[in-house]
Image (cartoon, grey):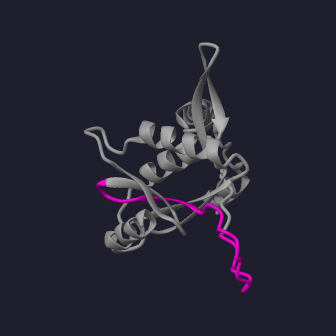
Amino acid sequence: MRRRWRRSRKDPGDINITAFMNLMVILVPFLLITAVFSRITILELNLPPASSGEVNKQTPELALEVVVRQNALEVGDRHGGLIRRLENTADGYDLAQLSELLQQIKARYPEKLDASVLLESDIPYDSLVQVMDAVRVGEVSQDGESVMTELFPEISIGDAPSNPMITASRQTGAAQ
């Protein structure tokens, strides 16, 4: 009986959380320092408008398409055919030539704001972003300084025609 009485009269032990608090004081700053903070940029992409059914008897306006293929970039007009094919360089896509060509097109069609970027399957996402950046803005030299100028900011993306001969046949049709 004495043993039961002694056990029941003991106070519960204190919980020592000092070691846990020390761990948290060190762990929280470590996790905050090693966390990766990324900046996310969002581009608004628009789908091409649906055809209204009315046939325009005037010459169709430029419908700019940049087709990204595994071995080249093809810049063309949906109605007029291939404008130019830019073969890959040793470093990959020739984005400088693409930007130069798009600046020439923009000079001819200053009111044009939209373009379509069409991709073959298995094109890396990074390549898509680089091509979209080249289509959106171009670098122009003014007074010895390089200035970024807007080219075709309204970009639509889609699948490239599976047969490159379709684009080649467009070119021969446009040349006649």
Residue 133 is covered by the magenta coloring: no
Residue 72, horizontal then vertical, whole percent: 33, 53
Q: In which quarter of the image is the N terminus?
A: bottom right
Q: In this view, does 5 lie above or below 134?
A: below
Can see residue 151? Answer: no
| Total number of numbered discs in the rendering | 0
Which residue corresponds to the image point at 33% horizontal and 74% vertical from the top-left?
Answer: 163
Q: Can residue 90 be seen in this view?
A: yes
Residue 64 picture location, percent across and down: 57, 59
Tell me the quarter of the picture where residue 7 sits: bottom right
Q: In which quarter of the image is the C terminus?
A: bottom left
Residue 55 among those drawn in magenta = yes
Question: In the displayed structure, would residue 145 be above or below residue 3?
Answer: above
Q: Residue furthest left?
A: 90
The residue sitting at the front extreme is 176
**Among the 4 quarters of the image, the one containing residue 45:** bottom right
Most foreground residue, 125 or 145: 145
Magenta highlight: main SS: loop
Specify start and end residues of the magenta stretch as a single range: 48-71
Q: Name the foreground residue: 161 vs 169.
A: 169
Closer-to-camera residue (89/124): 89
Could you tell whether 79 is left or right of 83 in the image? right
Q: Residue furthest bottom?
A: 53
Q: Nearer the viewer, residue 172 or 70?
A: 172
**Left or right for 34, reference 72:** right
Indicate the position of residue 5 as horizontal and vertical percent values: 69, 58
Q: Residue at the location (48% across, 45% down)?
A: 130
Name which residue lies at 69% across and 53% down.
112
